[in-house]
Image (tube, grey):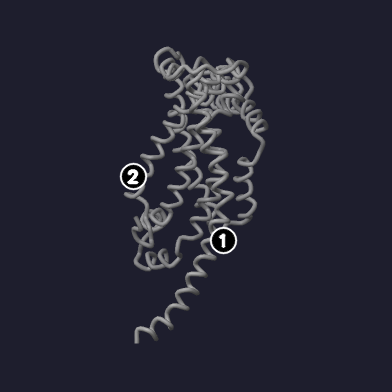
Amino acid sequence: METIKTKTINPLQKRRSRIFSAEARVAYICLIPAFLGLIFLTYLPLVGVLGISLTNWTGLKSPVFIGLDNYIKIFTTDPYIKDSIISTIYFAALSVTGSMIYSLFIALLLNRKIPARGFFRAVFYVPYVLPAAAIYVGWSWLYEGNFGFFNYVLSELGLNKILFIADSSFVVPSLSLISVWLAGNLIVIFLAGLQNVPVTYHEAAEMDGAGGWHRFRHITIPCMTPIIFYNLLMCLIANLQVVTPALALTNGGPGNSSRFLTYLMYDQAFVNYRLGYACATTLIIFAILAVFTTVLFKTSGRWIYNEGGDDK
């Protein structure tokens, strides 16, 4: 019996083994480009940044190893680092909160059967793909202290004018408003998620007498939590690395109120030619990003709804 069983099973096992081996080879071949990309475009540059951060390299002369001096200077003598960390986190908090609320609200409206829905979807997505220079020139006109549109509206309402990007109290919220307006990509992702919320859940809840708010709170939001997590993560990473608004509109001012961490890194690298110091600043930004994303991942299990069950 054992001999017959061996003759029957072994060919099947060999065939399955060949199939799995072939699938494994295809999988490994397809993974090679991504693997090489990660190695040469992500991990090796990161190691290079770490190495340069331990030198006093200016980009013009040979680097000299100075150990942790750049990090010590950043935390003991740098006059900008504290304000930069505070303004970066403040900007990210305003931008992420505003972008998530705004984009989910617009996505809910665009998910309804309204006339010219495709047109409005394009209108809200277009700002995301516009050239940055055009966007910030346009917003500089809106924020202009004397003749800008917003100050015109305020003066018509009998209110005092506001120096939106020339007042240290208003500059970060004003720049955050631009970031919120640019959240067209989040709207598209939210919209895709809303269209995958099972209609049967809403129909069953409606038959039980649930109103619109209860269906939104107890059906739509739980089903959208994986999408909310993804958008929250991407938005957080993008806004903690903010630099374009400060370069285009404020040059880090007024004072140091919009001297974000990435702007500080840019300033040290390409204005002061302190590449070693700039690389040390980069790794501090990386550490802050790692802390925030780790906290987000650690807490995600408590609020993300997984329809297929917990697969941890």
Q: Residue at x 54, y 60 (%)?
A: 25
Q: Residue at x 38, y 35 (%)?
A: 291
Q: Residue 157: percent from the left, percent from the top? A: 54, 27
Q: Is residue 1 above or below residue 31?
A: below
The disc at residue 299 is 2
Q: Residue 310: percent from the left, percent from the top? A: 34, 58
> Alpha-carbon neighbours of circle 2 within 10 Å: few (<14), some, or many (≥20)?
few
Number of callouts: 2
Q: 170 and 279: which one is in front?
A: 279
10 vs 150, left or right, is left
Asked which secondary structure carries label 2, the reply is: helix
Q: 165 and 250: which one is in front?
A: 250
Q: 265 and 4: which one is in front?
A: 4
Quadrant of the rendering where the N terminus is positioned: bottom left
The residues tagged by marks 2 and 1 sit, at their Cα atoms, a distance apart of 36 Å
Q: Residue 213: percent from the left, percent from the top? A: 39, 54
The extreme front residue here reads: 3
The disc at residue 269 is none
| Mark 2 or 1, closer to the camera | 1
The disc at residue 26 is 1
> Alpha-carbon neighbours of circle 1 within 10 Å: few (<14), some, or many (≥20)?
few
Give the residue type at disc 2: Thr
- Can you tell which quarter of the image residue 267 is in? top right
Q: Residue 209: percent from the left, percent from the top? A: 35, 64
141 vs 198, left or right, is right
Asked which secondary structure carries label 1, the reply is: helix
Q: Residue at x 42, y 19 (%)?
A: 68
Of label 2 and label 1, which has the lower sequence position?
Answer: 1
Quadrant of the rendering where the C terminus is positioned: bottom left
Give the residue type at disc 1: Val
Q: 152 and 198: which one is in front?
A: 198
- Can you tell which quarter of the image residue 164 is in? top right
